[in-house]
Image (spheres, helix red, strand yellow):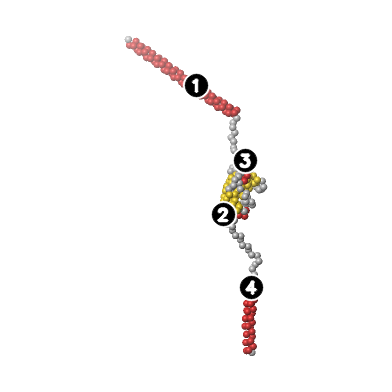
Amino acid sequence: MLVVVLLCAVGVVGGYGLGQAVDGARSLLAGPESLPADKVAAPEPLKLGGPATTCRADDVELRLSSSAPTVTAGSPMSFMVRVTNVGRVPCLFDGDAASRAVTITDDTGKEKVWSSADCSDGSRPLLLGPEGVDAGEVHWKSVQGCAKKAPVVGAGTYEATASLEDVPGATSEPLTFTVAAKAEAKTTPTPDAGDEGATSDDAAKGTTDGGATDDATQQETSTGDAKDDDEESDDAKADDAKGAEDRAADRKATADEKATTD
């Protein structure tokens, strides 16, 4: 019985070792793990030498901002255009106002009202390095077209968009702004010539009447003063007459008394 148990134990140990040996052989025969078929392509090498190339639409980013969200019709307005190189190498673009264009349309974006590209000319090549930023202002007088006496735009909502003429496809997001109606100037009514004449006549008449009234008052005052003088003269005369009578009576009394004494 003991011999049977020992034989079974030896068989189990041997079988386990044999299984491990088989697994090891299989792992050696399988070789390395298979790689995925879709490999990522390596980036193209940068060509830093040689002349710089013109910027592509994917190389630049345009941002547009305005000096105010609302402008009065006929008043000036400024736009700021920022060009950023988001590519990996320096590139060239035309930074003149004729190329760095701001175009204004109605709120539908279909009818063009004004564009800085139509009102200027020239060229200003700029080399912009990676992550480099170049900013420039564009001015607008709230008018239609580029003529010196161009008509003023009407009140309403408009859209502005920036673009680079020498970089096809390089545009900014549209910017919406409002044009307010111009306030009407208040005028003061001017009196007619007839009204001015009437006013002058009334003033002259008032002056004449006032003068006449003053003369009448002065004459009345003078008359009153003369009357007072006459009354004072009569009183003086009455006093003089009474004094004469008293003196005559005194003389008569004196004469009678003297006659009686004699």
Helix, strand or loop status at disc 4: loop
Q: From mark 4 to mark 1, how far is it between C-alphas?
A: 147 Å
Q: Which residue is mark 3?
A: 147
State whether residue 43 is above or below residue 118: below
Q: Earlier in the sequence, mark 4 or mark 2?
A: 4
Quarter of the view holding residue 36: bottom right
At label 3, the amino acid type is Ala
Q: What residue is shown with label 2?
A: 129
**N-terminal-most mark, 4 or 1:** 4
**SS for dot 2:** loop
Using the image as rendered, state which of residue 56 and residue 19 is in the foreground.
56
- Say which amino acid is labelled 1: Gln
Quick one: 47 or 256, which is closer to the camera?
A: 47
Amino acid type of the residue tagged 2 in the rendering? Gly
| Front disc: 4 or 1 | 4
Neighbours of disc 1 within 10 Å: few (<14), some (14-19), many (20+) = few
Q: CA distance from mark 1 to mark 3?
A: 78 Å
Answer few, some or many: residues within 10 Å of disc 2's Cα (few below 14, many 20 plus, some between 14 and 19).
some
Q: Which mark is residue 44?
A: none
Classify mark 3: helix, strand or loop.
loop
- Residue 167 point in image, percent of width and height: 62, 51
Q: Position of residue 110 (x, y in %)?
A: 67, 47
Q: Along the polypeptide, which appears first: circle 1 or circle 3?
A: 3
Residue pushed farthest left?
262
Q: CA distance from mark 4 to mark 3?
A: 81 Å
Give the amino acid at mark 4. Gly
- Relative side of 127 to 108, left or right: left
Give 62 or 202, whichever is nearer the viewer: 62
Q: Mark 1 or mark 2: which comes first in sequence?
A: 2
Say which residue label 1 marks. 219
